């Protein structure tokens, strides 16, 4: 039976945080010596020295911008999908405000539409009265059922997937302490490793 991979979009299929950091935050803070590799938390309030509301407003505005639409897809995953993608089914899962989901879906299918057939969103900071089906990605994965691998930059999301019996994979980013390289992670999936891939 063909196995299913659920992929996070932001900071896995694309480089959202890096793109926002270099095109928005750094120009607005020219005196800062902070580099992307120095971001030790996500959300990065402590690393950036800013408040939650300021960060979220800036990131959400970027998600709706032309610069976000023009982000390049992750080249390592593009190449991996060309070589191995047809051997798996692929689902995209993002956690973001609902008003920013349409641009994410358009971006996904424009760059990865040959492989992805499903797009899921867990709304963040929902407007009052909006139905709440899932509290987090773990709830979504429980509802979805049938996933074999889950790839995300958040250790908490990966832990929720592992609790459901899914092979959880922490995608390497500066803030998550992943011990595998991107190449290691993609090779393990390609080999259909039956063991959990730990951070």
Image: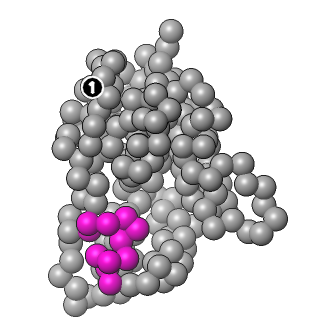
Q: Is residue 42 magenta?
A: yes
Disc 1 secondary structure class: helix
Residue found at x 57% / y 37%? 141
Q: Is residue 35 magenta?
A: no
Farthest residue toward the right? 129
What coloring was used for the rendering? Answer: one colour
Q: Position of residue 90 (x, y in %)?
A: 51, 29
Q: Which residue is mark 1?
A: 188
Q: Nearer the viewer, residue 109 or 92?
A: 92
- Tell me: 147 left or right of 48: right
The magenta span reads: 39-49
The answer to whether residue 19 is visible is no
The answer to whether residue 122 is visible is yes
Residue found at x 46% / y 28%? 165
Residue found at x 26% / y 43%? 199
Crowd around label 1: few <14 · some 14–19 · many ≥20 (10 Å): some
Q: Position of residue 164 (x, y in %)?
A: 50, 32
Q: Is residue 40 above or below residue 168?
A: below
**Residue 187 position by quadrant:** top left
Q: Is residue 30 above or below residue 110?
A: below
The chief SS type of the magenta part is: loop
Farthest residue toward the top? 1
Residue found at x 56% / y 23%? 146
Q: Position of residue 161 (x, y in %)?
A: 46, 38
Q: Is residue 150 above or below residue 153?
A: above
């Amino acid at each position: 039976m063909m196995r299913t991979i659920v992929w996070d979009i932001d900071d896995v299929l694309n480089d959202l945080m890096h793109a926002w950091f270099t095109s928005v935050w750094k120009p607005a803070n020219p005196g800062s010596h902070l580099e992307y590799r120095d971001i030790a938390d996500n959300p990065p309030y402590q690393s950036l020295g800013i408040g939650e509301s300021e960060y979220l407003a800036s990131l959400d505005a970027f998600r709706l911008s032309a610069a976000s639409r023009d982000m390049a897809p992750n080249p390592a995953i593009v190449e991996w999908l060309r070589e191995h993608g047809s051997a798996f089914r692929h689902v995209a899962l993002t956690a973001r405000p609902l008003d920013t989901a349409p641009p994410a879906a358009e971006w996904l299918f424009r760059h990865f539409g040959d492989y992805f057939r499903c797009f899921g969103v867990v709304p963040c900071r929902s407007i009052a009265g909006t139905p709440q089906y899932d509290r987090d990605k773990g709830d979504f994965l429980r509802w979805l059922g049938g996933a074999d691998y889950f790839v995300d930059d958040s250790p908490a999301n990966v832990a929720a997937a592992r609790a459901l019996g899914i092979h959880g994979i922490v995608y390497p980013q500066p803030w998550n302490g992943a011990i595998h390289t991107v190449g290691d992670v993609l090779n393990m999936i390609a080999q259909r490793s039956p063991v959990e891939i730990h951070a």
